[in-house]
Image (cartoon, grey):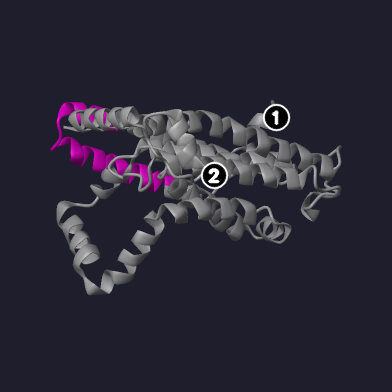
Amino acid sequence: MNILVAHWSFDPMIFVVLATIGAHEVGLRRLSEHSRPERTRRRRRKSYVFYAGLALLVLTVASPVDYWASDYFYVHMLEHIVLAFATPMMVVIGAPWLPLMFALPVGARRRVGRFIYLSGGARPLRVAGRLVRNPWVGLVSFNAVMVLWHIPYWFELAQRNGFVHVWVMHGSFLVTGVLFWLQILPSPPVKAAKGAIWQSGAILGTNVVMTLLAMAMSFFSSTSWYPSYAHIAGVTFSPFADQQIGAAILWVCGDFWAVPVLNMVLRRAVASEGSMSNVFDRLISRAIHLKPEAHARHAALSAEREVAAE
């Protein structure tokens, strides 16, 4: 029981979370004044998912999880999984973008909008906005950040420097996680730039990267990578055994998130392409030559989606 109630800490990221919740609630109230009741209820339901993701973030960085992550690598790996996968997924599903935008008063909102979209001085911001919305940036940055922070030099730097640990390491997991999941999960009004075929490839590729990283830390190594976990008082098993458990967590959790999300995306891909064989053809980058009946099915499905959208 002492493990659960002791070693709680204060993380400065809590201030960011509280400010975000306050702004989100203001935006929800303003939107409700101009929206139909069903839309207001839908936004409120999504807000619960968003707030649950923020609560999970606070629980991860302020609870004993963060304390024990300093002694046990496998606990640190659990922390990374939550920050890169679970929390960003819940944020994206919660779709907080419109409420956060409407947190500004209407006058300020219009001034900011005119500046960003019309001002010549904001051209670098527009370029940066297009860059971060690029699906390849989301995919590559997400995988690069996960690999980078498990390279011993950078991992040890974060262990020694609290600012790097909290704001750079944890922040990069959160930001790139959101950018990645925005390309996979629906989060209105943001729309994914690529279709289900690209999304399937992104999920499979990311799962491969996580698996290779886990194998590098376990099967392809014979010693611990991280000196900060050596000779810690009270730790009874070896640093390498600790690292192997962490690698197993990364491997298992990679499959845990990938399988259900890939199933969802493949269902969308089948609806778009007409059959699973066409999906596989696209996934392995072969030219697709649909049969006439497949063309008919594809056209019918497209027409049904257009009618549903109207």
Q: Is residue 189 left or right of residue 215?
A: left
Q: Give the label on residue 14, or none.
A: none
x, y percent for residue 110? 16, 58
Label 2 with label 1: CB-CB less than 8 Å: no
Q: Which region shows up in magenta?
A: 17-43
Q: As shown in the figure, which amino acid type bears the numbered disc 2?
A: Ala
Label 2 Cα crowd, 10 Å radius (few <14 / some 14-19 / many 20+): many
Picture layout, residue 39 above or below residue 212: above
Q: Residue 69 placed where, x, y %? A: 69, 43
Q: Residues within 10 Å of mark 1 (few under 14, many from 20)?
A: few
Residue at figure coordinates x 28%, y 29% from the top left: 296
By secondary structure, the bulk of the magenta-drawn segment is best described as helix
Q: Nearer the viewer, residue 250 or 262?
A: 262
Label 2, label 1: how many angstroms apart (C-alpha)?
28 Å
Q: Residue furthest bottom?
A: 121
Q: Position of residue 16 (x, y in %)?
A: 43, 50
Furthest-front residue in this view: 292
Looking at the image, residue 102 lies above or below residue 75 = below
- Residue 57 in view (yes/no): no
Q: Which residue is mark 1?
A: 2
Does residue 43 appear anywhere in the picture? yes
- Quadrant, the N terminus: top right
The spot of residue 134 in percent (x, y) is 39, 55
Residue 88 shown in magenta = no
At mark 1, the secondary structure is helix
Q: What residue did someone put label 2 on? A: 84
Q: Nearer the viewer, mark 2 or mark 1?
A: 2
Q: Residue at x 56, y 44 (%)?
A: 206
Quadrant of the image occupied by residue 96: top left
